[in-house]
Image (spheres, rainbow, N blue to C red):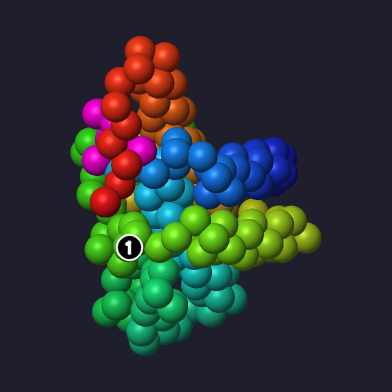
Amino acid sequence: MADLAALLPKALSQVDELLAVAEDPGPFPTTRTRVSGWTALEHAEHMARADEGELYQLEQALQRSGSDEPRSGSDEPRGRSGGQGSRSGRRPRGITLAGRGVLALGWIPRGIGKAPEIARPAGVDRAQVAADLRRVREEIAALAPRLPEIAAGRGRASHPIFGGLTPAQWVRVLYVHHHHHLKIIRDIRRAFEAGAAAGLPRRPAA
């Protein structure tokens, strides 16, 4: 519970940092660098999409905490952001070895995983990315009074790599996933600023 209480404000601060990228009117958010195949804005858009799916799965895990019965289709994606689990309706098994390692270390190796198609950036404009991030921020903030329920929850919902996660583990996924993409965004910014200082031409996103 104490860990969750500490993670939630950190996750909100991370969303604020992503929001600052989407609200930046300058060339940085849409400039391509050698750091990543995505621009900083595309990373922010991906996080808005992924967060919605992860929050949906957190809710599914909470629902399962109050029932021993499998829910047919309960991992079905929501909206355009989608969940990230199985659609089979079978109760997910426990966390995988990869999931244990990532959540324990708080670190996702770069270039290993591939975002599911539904969470990949679709090239929406900055205003839409910002609006999506604000909505996600509200949903994360709304978890604060539910922390005792989240901490006690033993239901699970599926992650495609990390396996069946409890509500508390889904909160940690939010934080670790944010941390991963914000590190990349900061590296993109450093590359962008170094290029600007050297007078190199910018490569705006198409």
Q: Give above or below for 185 relative to 163.
A: above
Q: Which residue is mark 1?
A: 122
Q: Residue at the location (43% across, 78% down)?
A: 79
Q: Residue at the location (45% across, 39% down)?
A: 27
Callout 1: 10 Å neighbours few (<14), some, many (20+)?
few
Residue 49 visible in the displayed image: yes
Instruction: Give how far across and how far down residue 57 sits, in percent.
Output: 46, 66
Q: Give above or below for 51 relative to 73.
A: above
Q: Give above or below for 61 relative to 187.
A: below
Residue 186 in magenta stretch: no
Q: Main secondary structure of the magenta part?
A: loop
Instruction: Give how far across and how far down residue 166 sits, in percent.
Output: 50, 58
Residue type at tag 1: Ala
Q: Residue at the location (53% across, 79% down)?
A: 67
Q: Give above or below for 96 relative to 34.
A: below
**Residue numbers of the magenta segment:** 31-37
Q: How many marks?
A: 1
Q: Looking at this rendering, what residue extends furthest in the right direction?
A: 145
Residue 183 visible in the displayed image: no
Instruction: Give how far across and how far down residue 148 sits, in percent.
Output: 72, 57
Residue 32 in magenta stretch: yes
In this picture, residue 53 sits left or right of residue 198: right
Q: Looking at this rendering, what residue extends furthest in the bottom direction?
A: 72
Instruction: Give how far across and how far down residue 30 sits, in percent.
Output: 39, 44
